[in-house]
Amino acid sequence: MTIVYPLTRHARLDDIFAITAKRPVTVASFLADVANLAATLPHHRYLFNLCDDRYRFTVAFAAALVRQQISLMPPSNTAGVLSGIAAGYDDLYAIHDGTPPAIQMPAFAYPDHNASVQPATTMPSFPDAQPAVTLFTSGSTGQPAPHLKSWGSLVRSSIAAGNSLGVDRLRGATVIGTVPQQHSYGIESTVMLALQHGLVLHHARPFYPSDVIACVEAAPAPRIIITTPVHLRAVLTESGQMPNADLIVSATAPLSPQLAIEAEKRFNAPLLEIYGCSEAGAVAVRRTVENDEWCCIEGAALRQDGEGTWAAGAAVEREVMLNDVIELHSASRFHLHGRLADLVNIAGKRTSLAHLNYHLNSIEGVRDGVFVMPDENDSGTTRLMAFVVAPDLTADTILAALRARIDPAFLPRPIRMIDALPRNVLGKLSREAVDQLADRKAV
Amino acid sequence: MPDSNLQSSPENALAELIVTTLNLEVEPSTIDPMAPLYDEGLGLDSIDVLEIALAVSKTYGVKLRSDDKNNVAIFTCLRSLSDYIQQHRTT
């Protein structure tokens, strides 16, 4: 027998499911919007869901499930990223709610008047194994690496994560996200969390500190804020009273204890951090002000072997190698000690230095070049540096060439043009030599 | 609004603030006030925009809001951002 999971787990069809720009939307109206849109979507196997509005994104995501189409989640909307992914999928279109895709491809505008007259009376369910979304991480060869998630794995992951976050104590809470829904953490912790825990999805993605504060203030309580260290730090630079929240969730990078303490105090809410990755989804949770040890979400477990640390669990379709240095205390408790040396994580986007160096050295005129991750500090987002040997090129030319090849988050600042890299006799570049270069050139 | 490619004095001050805040590899005075800040121009991303918003709020007392319908227009180029700040500054 096929296992199926319902689209939403709200107790009643007249519960509120979302707050949109115009009005609160009941579960029944949401289901009607989904059915309406599903009836009009074009016939294709894959789609880019580029909707900015989180409610419309969710309707499009659900309508795609009804039509058994697979949603591709581009890490950004730049032409380079979209065309890189599109090259791997023949039968692809894009749905958007205002900004059409930056590349030539079939595009479908989210209809202005999708709202249907007849509320729906039946809840759609989808099979456990139905392919639902494909997330992308930077591969080692230059093309984004796809990670396909089934509907069942998304559902189990969000149920387990939500239980560990204690959202069942916050029935009917409004979920306000500052994170894009096209990101692994974004779709799991806003869209899926609201669908599978009977919560209310807020349509907006407040960006500037004053937007976040105004959006939280205007939202009905209880309130859950889904955010990242970058956004949280920005919001906390605002002086004055913060609106009360009931839960703050942060992920994509570890949060400093000082920031966690300040956030808890000023929003008068517990702050929980999630540890995870695109391949595995949420893996573990901690309350930063109480404990720096991570505790796996239900069903998840870690194990270590000679190769590294592996995560498995109800939500993980097959074991996933984690890219961090982990000190395991038991199968479900651990400390994080930073990422593996070659990996870079900026703004929740991950890549490897090897991948970046590959692109840098593939630029015509570059004789040698290396990306360096400076030591991180608390004041702002750490950006990469690059040292390049290219006598006939300028830093501007190299930057322009890189922009066409890599995600903007990884563009080097600064690019230092040098005569030669301090390689040893074996042609290797030691970390010490690179650090010395970075220190010297920083002056 | 000046229509030349030369920076006005407030534009130059803002260019310096942006370059310092983001640790950019350009001479502030060489930023074309009409060139796009995103993508081909300075190549800024959304985290940069957030950093600039914090610096602008601290320096000029202007709080940027995205429910302002002009938000995309404000960040079009150095000139549009500078004009917006000059109209709304409190310090």
Image (spheres, coloured by chain):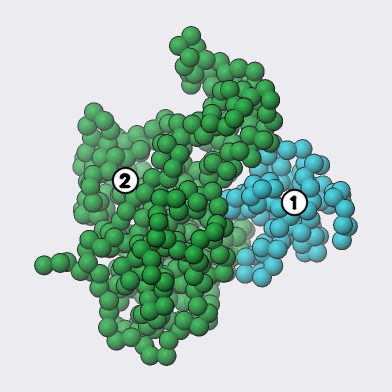
Q: Foreground: A309 or A170?
A: A309
Residue A244 horizontal/vertical position (percent): 49, 67
Image check: A134 left or right of A357? Answer: left
| Mark 2 lies on residue | A294
Residue A192 horizontal/vertical position (percent): 35, 65
Residue at the spot 40% in from the left edge and 50% down from the top edge: A88
Residue A11 horizontal/vertical position (percent): 27, 79
Q: Which chain is cyan?
A: B
Residue type indicated by callout 1: Ala
Whether discs 2 and 1 lie on one chain: the answer is no
Residue at the spot 49% in from the left edge and 64% down from the top edge: A106
Q: Which chain is green?
A: A
The quadrant holding residue B74 is bottom right
Look at the numbered disc 2 and give the secondary structure of its residue: strand
Which quadrant is home to the N terminus of chain A?
bottom left
Residue at the spot 46% in from the left edge and 72% down from the top edge: A56
Mark 2 or 1: the one toward you = 1
Question: Dot 2 falls on which chain?
Answer: A
Residue at the spot 50% in from the left edge and 47% down from the top edge: A347
Residue type indicated by callout 2: Trp
Disc sitting over residue A379 in the figure: none
Q: Is residue A48 visible?
A: yes
| Mark 1 lies on residue | B35
